[in-house]
Amino acid sequence: MIDDDFNSFDNVMYALQSVLPDCNLLLAEQMAMITHNAGEAELYSGFGNDVYIKYAQLQKLGLNVDIRTK
C-alpha cells in the first residue's frame, strides 16, 4: 500500500479488514500508521491469482496499491 492524501484512516482500516484474511482492527490500524509514516507498507504476499484478487479488491475500495516481485 502506498500513502496518499485522500483516504482517511477509517477508510483504509475498513478496506484492509474487508479484504485481508485475519486482519482485525488493531492490525489494520498498525498497517495504516506504518504506511502513513513510511510512505508505503507491504500488506500481503502470496502466489498466483490470490495476489491479483486482493490487489483488485483493495483498488476497488480506493486504496493506492502496487504489486511488486522480489
Image (tube, rainbow, N blue to C red):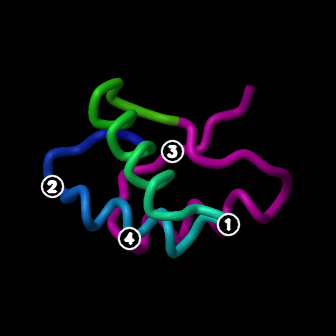
Q: Quadrant of residue 1?
A: top left
- Gap between marks 1 and 2 measured at Cα: 25 Å
**Could you tell me which secondary element the residue under label 2 belongs to?**
loop
The residue that mark 4 highlights is 14
**Amino acid under disc 3:** Asp
Q: Amino acid at mark 2?
A: Phe
Say what secondary structure mark 1 lies in: loop
Mark on residue 21?
Answer: 1
Where residue 35 appears, as percent x and y from the top left, is 37, 36
> Which of disc 2 and disc 3 is earlier in sequence?
2
* Magenta-drawn segment: 42-70
| x and y percentages locating residue 25 in the rendered image | 44, 63
Q: Is the residue under label 4 in contact with that under label 3 (CB below 8 Å)?
A: no
The amino acid sitting under disc 4 is Tyr
- Whether tag 1 and tag 4 are in contact, CB under 8 A, the answer is no
Per the image, label 3 sits on a secondary structure element best described as loop
Q: Amino acid at mark 1?
A: Pro
